[in-house]
Image (tube, helix red, strand yellow):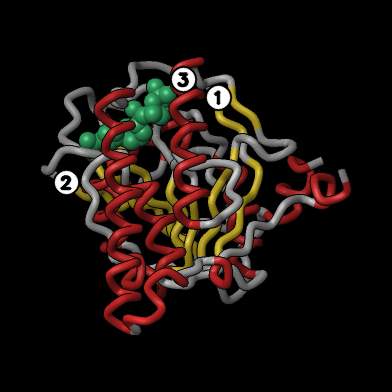
């Protein structure tokens, strides 16, 4: 059902240009698969290479000769994404991984939701018709724990936290105030969007196993970075609130900023 709808949405959208930003570190065996499946609505492709040694850039250019290749020497997915965002020129920026675990055809869902008026659209593997075959038991527990912390700190109702398929209107980039270097960039995007009062939606997404190669994520190291980021962003939000109005220190609420949209099937159940 979702795949059928995605196909209908895949045509270029008049008036909305789309940039895909794809961080890649030694993904030569995967990136061609990703680039060759980008839907027609994608106008610009930015591949951010992190000093790959396996021919990732050549593989990207073979699959998509019009790709812009950005060389980011600082290590980390966050540093790579920030470099890619800075070089993108579309009205809409969609970030996805280069390992083939995310289906590029889903991009149209994100773009359609942004066109409905949202500022940031995040994928969720845990909404109905989303899913994953790529999450270990340990990662699942970590993800759920961090999600619970995030929802409590931000009074939000997200179903997902650590997932890198997301899209936003490029004109909100400055308000996202991104500084993260590592995998915590995904958390920072969401937390800062809420702080900035942006309209956020979730859409279902399916994550498969990476097509080949090994993960760059380390559960303890990167989980702690995500937790630190959540706490830091919340503290900054509280400081900003106190500075604006010392009497309202305990009344900070993100509720007005948050719109989590669920598919109709979830709303009915
Ligand atoms: N440029 C750049 N890209 C990176 C870096 N670290 C990770 N990436 C890319 O970021 C994306 C996500 O990294 P993964 O290693 O797949 O992390 P993961 O999805 O948690 O791990 P898997 O479940 O094994 O896929 C992939 O496209 C990586 O190639 C980096 O330091 N520089
Ligand atoms: Mg991956």
The first of marks 1 and 2 along the sequence is 2
Q: Is residue 162 above or below residue 12?
A: above
Cα distance between the residues tagged 1 and 3: 8 Å
Q: Residues at badges 1 and 3 in contact (C-beta under 8 Å)?
A: yes
The residue wearing badge 3 is 211
User: Which residue is at 44% across, 27% downward?
Assistant: 142
Q: In this view, does 230 lie above or below 195?
A: above
Identity of the residue furthest to the front in this view: 247
**Near-viewer residue (166 or 86):** 166
Q: Is residue 174 toward the left or the right of residue 8 in the image?
A: left
- Count of labels in the image: 3
Q: Residue 208 carries which label?
A: 1
Q: Is residue 163 toward the left or the right of residue 255 in the image?
A: left
Label 2 CB sits under 8 Å from any ligand 1 atom: yes
Locate the N terminus and report the quarter of the image it occupies: top right
Q: Residues at badges 1 and 2 in contact (C-beta under 8 Å)?
A: no
Q: Can residue 7 be seen in this view?
A: yes
User: Which residue is at 79% across, 43% downward?
Assistant: 4
Secondary structure beneath label 3: loop
User: Which residue is at 57% across, 72% downward?
Assistant: 256
Q: Quadrant of residue 96?
A: top left
Please provide percent x and percent y for residue 77: 27, 40
Q: How crowded is mark 2: few (under 14 residues within 10 Å), some or many (20 or more)?
A: some
User: Which residue is at 43% across, 67% downward?
Assistant: 90
**Near-viewer residue (74 or 194):** 194
Q: Is residue 57 visible?
A: no
The first of marks 2 and 3 along the sequence is 2
């Amino acid at each position: 059902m979702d795949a059928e709808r995605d196909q209908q949405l895949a045509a270029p959208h008049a008036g909305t240009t789309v940039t895909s930003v794809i961080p890649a570190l030694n993904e030569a065996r995967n990136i061609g698969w990703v680039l060759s499946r980008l839907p027609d609505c994608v106008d610009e492709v930015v591949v951010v290479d992190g000093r790959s040694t396996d021919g990732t850039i050549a593989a990207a250019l073979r699959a998509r000769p019009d790709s812009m290749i950005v060389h980011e020497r600082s290590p980390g997915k966050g540093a790579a994404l920030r470099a890619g965002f800075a070089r993108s020129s579309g009205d809409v920026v969609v970030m996805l991984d280069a390992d083939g675990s995310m289906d590029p055809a889903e991009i149209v869902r994100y773009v359609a939701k942004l066109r409905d008026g949202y500022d940031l659209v995040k994928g969720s593997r845990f909404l109905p018709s989303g899913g994953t075959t790529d999450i270990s038991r340990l990662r699942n527990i970590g993800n759920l724990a961090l999600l619970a912390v995030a929802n409590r700190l931000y009074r939000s109702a997200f179903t997902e936290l650590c997932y890198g398929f997301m899209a936003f209107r490029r004109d909100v980039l400055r308000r996202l105030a991104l500084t993260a270097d590592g995998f915590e960039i995904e958390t920072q995007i969401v937390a800062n969007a809420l702080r900035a009062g942006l309209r956020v939606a979730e859409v279902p997404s399916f994550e498969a196993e990476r097509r080949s190669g090994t993960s760059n994520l380390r559960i303890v190291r990167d989980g702690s970075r995500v937790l630190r980021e959540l706490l830091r962003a919340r503290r900054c939000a509280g400081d900003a609130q106190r500075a604006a109005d010392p009497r309202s220190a305990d009344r900070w609420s993100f509720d007005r900023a948050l719109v989590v949209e669920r598919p109709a099937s979830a709303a009915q159940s």
